[in-house]
Amino acid sequence: MYKILEAKELADSIYEFVVKAPNVSANCQPGQFVIVRTNEDSERIPLTICDYDREKETVTIVVQVIGAGTYIMKDLKTGDSFCDFVGPLGRPSELIDTPIDELKKKKILFVAGGLGTAPVYPQVKWLHEQGVDADVIVGAKTQSLIIMEKEMEAVAGNLYITTDDGSYKRQGMVTKVIEDLYAEGKEYDLCVTIGPMIMMKFVCLLTKKFNLKTIVSMNPIMVDGTGMCGACRLTVGDSVKFACVDGPEFDGHLVNFDEAMKRQQIYKTAEGRAYLKDKEGDTHHGGCGNCGGEK
């Protein structure tokens, strides 16, 4: 069992849990995720690591209530426990393997949408700890859905917040902020964007015009977290990839977002999953690299 040391509601239907997980905290890196089960009968839920403390042996996750499994989580309190807390899984951010001297020469922009603020935070924090400043754009539908503002402000070079309805700070989509920054003379060498699929798609369409390399995290399409369910299959350039084992981060300009979003809708029903399995054959699963899953 994995004890919850701290539990709190960050915003409407968004909850933060600080969990005692020595093995995960000792080995995780920004960009990776864990698989969590509340109890033995719960579904397995992949959640991106929001923060970690190696000395305190803790890992922080942020959960949005969107289904049965996360609905159960919302009632957990400090002192309760998770049945399973498995990880770290997935590949760390490519920033981790980049020489610090090179990172210090780059102008880096992070774009977070909604819950995407949580997985953006550990990357920006890690850069800050290495002496590398990065600008951050955080967007949400309305002020009440802005999370981790103080934490992000403490590690970002510049923090730009925007809301769709104009209830807080700027008004408009995150893409409008990018356009405004470039109009003001700002230029960047790398963009990392994490959030809803549709947001990441339009960020990539815009950054392609600026010839700005853009990394996206495809964690929104993960289900099983091991490559065996076929849910997070996507096309990146000319290759079939699986977000949970090959990612979750990819070159956003190579991701076929339209295909991924359409496939995500089809996958929701048993009939749709059967259709995809028949259509995709041996590339439907990806546990060990297009192995065919249960074959």
Image (cartoon, helix red, strand yellow):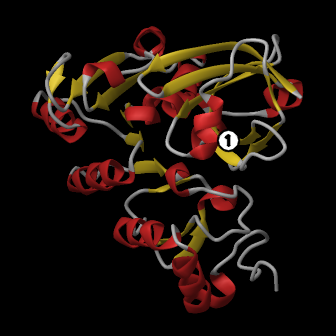
| Residue 229 visible, this angle | yes
Please name whichever residue, 75 or 225, is drawn nearer the observer in this view of the structure.
Answer: 75
Residue at screen point 45% across, 36% down = 116
Please name whichever residue, 36 or 270, is drawn nearer the observer in this view of the structure.
Answer: 270
Q: Which picture quadrant has residue 261?
A: bottom left
Q: Which picture quadrant has residue 265?
A: bottom left
Residue 288 point in image, percent of width and height = 79, 71
Figure quadrant of the C terminus? bottom right
Please name whichever residue, 289 or 264, is drawn nearer the observer in this view of the structure.
Answer: 264
Residue at screen point 51% across, 31% down = 103
Neighbourhood count class around disc 1 (C-alpha, 10 Å): few under 14, some 14–19, many 20 upward: many
| Residue 98 visible, this angle | no
Residue 245 point in image, percent of width and height = 70, 59
Instruction: Note whether 191 is above or below 11 in the view shown.
Output: below
Instruction: Note whether 174 is above or below 145 in the view shown.
Output: below
Figure quadrant of the N terminus? top right
Lateral position of residue 116 relative to residue 18, left or right: left
User: How many numbered discs?
Assistant: 1
Residue 51 point in image, percent of width and height = 64, 23
* SS assignment at label 1: strand
Lateral position of residue 196 relative to residue 75, left or right: left
Residue at screen point 42% across, 17% down = 156
Tag 1 residue: 33
Residue 115 point in image, percent of width and height = 45, 34
Residue at screen point 45% across, 49% down = 215
Q: Amino acid at mark 1?
A: Phe
Furthest toward the left, the residue is: 183
